[in-house]
Image (cartoon, rainbow, N blue to C red):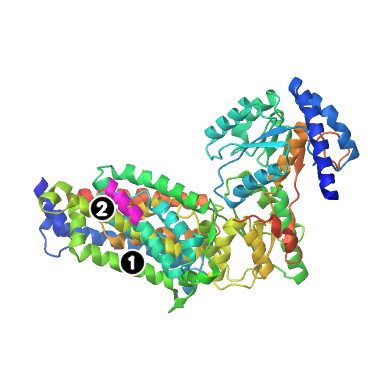
């Protein structure tokens, strides 16, 4: 009974706040409605309470890769947790043109905020800018728009940091073992992407602090099959390997299959991204010892941020009254010791 | 005009022949020599640059295992191209077959059903290609392009764009790549068996002779009493079956079924067939040539990775080889006529 009363009170206050805010929202733009809510920020930690009704538009590339599939799923799941969020995803597409017109349709619907993971930041910059000019705050997810006027807040992963995390894990472990001139291999994703180059640079820089360097580097295509082919050949080229970093857990499935087929186990491997499958491999204990995250949970965070921005709130743990302009997530290293903690966050590839 | 072409096309598989066809056979042999020479050259490059790694048995096994998947597809593609067609949908059909065979429902029936499923899906998609082309009178390029797009889409839809792992209880599929007989993984034997069967079918059966006839001059073939439509349909079905077998091999190698499998395989297979001396206009070609062409590509990839060179240079090299092969092909054609 008591819980029932509590729930009723909670709902009542929620709807009262909502009604009051709605009244102001009808007459003015979001900037002023922020005033009513700022008090709740100062009390801290209750940002999840229902506030102004917000419509959040969401656009992302087509999910032909486990990571991007997880992005769309996480965004939707997060939005569903809020009674005050009306989630409006548009059809995911890999066609730049289609994504532009999808975002345009969201602008025309006058959504309260936009979360956009562009196919290409450069090419969607203009339409994001159009949204901002129309007074719709844009939360830019991961692939950054070159023009700061095109987004209110950027949230994304740290590709360089991912390389650094992998480099430190491998470097430290080999140093502790006392390996003099280790053979360290690197299997990249699509080599032409800036994110791949950032990852490789971070990896090389971190290894350098231990006096190590990458022995050989090859690129795959983020697909299982390309990972399998490249790893199959690399294992032939190097009869004795000490460590291997593979940039992407999806293609990692193919890399692991190649290692198994070649019957090799004299080295250890580190993955990237943090897929559920990689975590299970780490838990089972095998060649794959660790993976460095580039977590699609960032989509959940982006929805949270878009809601806060539209409601004019800040982040409870920060002193500032508004959401920061940019948030770079740290790349976390998952090993056998902490894998249980991360398993719920892992995405199915 | 019609008569001479029929003459040279029909008996190409048989031994006795008028002068024109004998010279064609001789040329085929010479071109194979060229391909073998190219392979030997690559092997020498490998021996010089990577004396410790190239000529090892494990590297040779690795090259053959890598070649197996596209190799099986290449056999089907050779038939289609000799028959005067083209199949752009091979990669997508393979992806679809691998996805269909790894769905939860299919996997619950065990590895044998998975393999049958892959082959049936391939055969079905191939037969549909053939039906559209022969009875629907669609241009092969268009019909198989449509299949490529649609099969890719269906594969994505079925898998929900996820990579589907082969479940541990079905590891008999994976055993194809991990079990070795006389040092070679089973999938290499499957590859060899498909090549052998393809060679016999093309060179020692009526089906093979009809394929040359249909590709060389469909009108003359029809007048000679061959059911060209039915034969065309069979050719595309055969290519589909090869894609299904390739899907089993890719599942064995990668332990997964995925809509991303087979990306651009159609181009690799077509390139191998052309390097192997098969005419894109149909009516002439060999299985052995196609396989040699494919091995050249695979060895180049292997050499580049052994030497730590990057992918871009590898692509340039492959492009140059295609151009060189076609130029040589044209020269030898001119000298023969």
Mark 1: few, some, or many residues within 10 Å (few <14, many ≥20)? Answer: many
Q: Residue A331: x and y, percent?
A: 73, 52
The structure residue drawn at horizontal position 78% and vertical position 38%, both measured from the top left corner, is A50
Q: In terms of secondary structure, what is the magenta stretch mainly?
A: helix
**Mark in front: 2 vs 1:** 2
Q: Secondary structure at mark 2?
A: helix
Q: Which residue extends farthest right? A: A43
The structure residue drawn at horizontal position 62% and vertical position 72%, both measured from the top left corner, is A265
Q: Residue B233 — which label?
A: 2
Position of A115 compared to B291: left or right? right
Q: Secondary structure at mark 1?
A: helix
Query: Is residue B184 within the magenta segment?
Result: no
Q: Residue B194 — which label?
A: 1
Q: Residue A78: x and y, percent?
A: 70, 45
- Given residues A265 and B156, the one toward you in this image is B156
Q: Which residue extends farthest front? A: A1
**Residue B307 seen in this snapshot:** no
Residue B204: which quarter of the image? bottom left
Q: Chain of mark 1?
A: B
- Say whether disc 2 or disc 1 marks the residue closer to the N-terminus: 1
Q: Specify the segment rendered in magenta.
A: B124-132
- Given residues A272 and A167, the one toward you in this image is A272
- Given residues A86 and A146, the one toward you in this image is A86
Query: Is residue B126 within the magenta segment?
Result: yes
B148 vs A169: above or below: above
- Given residues A62 and B202, the one toward you in this image is A62
Residue B72: which quarter of the image? bottom left
**Residue B101 seen in this snapshot:** yes
Q: CA distance from mark 2 to mark 1?
A: 20 Å
């Amino acid at each position: 009974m008591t819980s029932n009363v509590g729930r009723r009170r909670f709902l009542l206050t929620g709807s009262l706040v909502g009604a009051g805010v709605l009244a102001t929202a009808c007459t003015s733009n979001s900037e002023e409605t922020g005033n009513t809510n700022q008090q709740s920020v100062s009390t801290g930690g209750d940002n999840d309470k229902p506030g102004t009704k917000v419509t959040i538009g969401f656009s992302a590339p087509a999910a032909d890769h486990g990571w991007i599939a997880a992005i769309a799923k996480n965004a939707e799941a997060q939005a569903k947790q809020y009674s005050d969020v009306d989630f409006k995803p548009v059809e995911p597409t890999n066609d730049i043109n289609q994504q532009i017109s999808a975002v345009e349709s969201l602008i025309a619907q006058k959504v309260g905020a936009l979360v956009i993971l562009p196919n290409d930041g450069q090419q969607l910059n203009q339409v994001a800018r159009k949204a901002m000019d129309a007074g719709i705050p844009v939360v830019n997810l991961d692939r950054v728009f070159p023009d700061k006027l095109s987004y209110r807040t950027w949230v994304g992963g740290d590709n360089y940091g991912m390389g650094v995390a992998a480099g430190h894990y491998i470097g430290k472990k080999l140093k502790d073992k006392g390996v003099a001139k280790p053979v360290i291999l690197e299997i990249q994703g699509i080599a032409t992407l800036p994110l791949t180059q950032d990852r490789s640079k971070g990896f090389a820089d971190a290894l350098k602090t231990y006096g190590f360097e990458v022995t050989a580097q090859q690129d795959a295509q983020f697909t299982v099959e390309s990972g399998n082919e490249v790893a199959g050949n690399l294992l032939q080229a190097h009869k004795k390997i000490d460590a291997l970093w593979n940039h992407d857990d999806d293609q990692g499935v193919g890399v692991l299959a190649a290692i198994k087929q070649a019957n090799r186990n004299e080295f250890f491997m580190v993955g990237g991204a943090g897929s559920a499958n990689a975590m299970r491999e780490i838990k089972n204990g095998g060649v794959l010892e660790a993976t460095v995250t580039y977590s699609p949970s960032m989509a959940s965070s982006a929805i949270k941020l878009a809601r806060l921005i539209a409601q004019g709130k800040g982040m409870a743990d920060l002193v500032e009254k508004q959401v920061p302009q940019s948030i770079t997530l740290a790349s976390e290293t998952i090993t056998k010791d902490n894998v249980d903690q991360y398993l719920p966050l892992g995405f199915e590839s | 005009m019609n008569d001479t072409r029929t003459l040279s096309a029909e008996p190409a598989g048989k031994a006795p022949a008028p002068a024109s066809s004998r010279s064609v056979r001789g040329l085929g042999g010479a071109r194979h020599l060229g391909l073998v020479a190219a392979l030997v050259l690559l092997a020498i490059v490998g021996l010089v640059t990577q004396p410790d790694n190239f000529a090892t048995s494990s590297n040779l096994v690795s090259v053959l295992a890598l070649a197996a998947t596209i190799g099986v597809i290449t056999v089907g593609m050779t038939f289609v191209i000799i028959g005067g067609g083209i199949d752009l949908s091979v990669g997508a059909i393979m992806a679809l077959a691998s996805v269909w065979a790894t769905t939860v429902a299919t996997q619950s029936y065990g590895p044998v059903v998975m393999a049958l499923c892959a082959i049936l899906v391939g055969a079905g998609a191939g037969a549909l290609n053939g039906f559209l082309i022969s009875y629907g009178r669609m241009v092969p390029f268009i019909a198989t392009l449509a299949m490529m797009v649609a099969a890719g889409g269906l594969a994505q839809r079925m898998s929900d764009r996820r990579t589907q792992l082969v479940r541990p209880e079905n590891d008999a599929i994976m055993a194809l790549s991990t079990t070795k007989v006389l040092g070679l993984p089973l999938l290499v034997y499957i590859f060899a068996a498909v090549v052998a069967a393809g060679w016999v079918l093309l060179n020692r059966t009526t089906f093979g002779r009809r394929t040359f006839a249909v590709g060389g001059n469909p009108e003359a073939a029809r007048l000679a009493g061959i059911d060209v439509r039915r034969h065309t349909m069979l050719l595309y079905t055969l290519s589909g079956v090869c894609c299904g077998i390739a899907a089993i091999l890719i599942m064995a190698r990668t332990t997964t079924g995925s809509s991303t499998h087979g990306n651009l395989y159609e181009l690799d297979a077509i390139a191998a067939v052309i390097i192997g001396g098969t005419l894109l206009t149909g009516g002439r070609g060999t299985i052995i040539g196609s396989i040699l062409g494919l091995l050249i590509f695979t060895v180049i990839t292997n050499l580049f990775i052994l030497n730590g060179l990057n992918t871009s240079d590898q692509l340039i090299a492959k492009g140059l080889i295609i151009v060189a092969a076609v130029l040589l092909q044209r020269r030898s054609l001119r000298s023969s006529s």
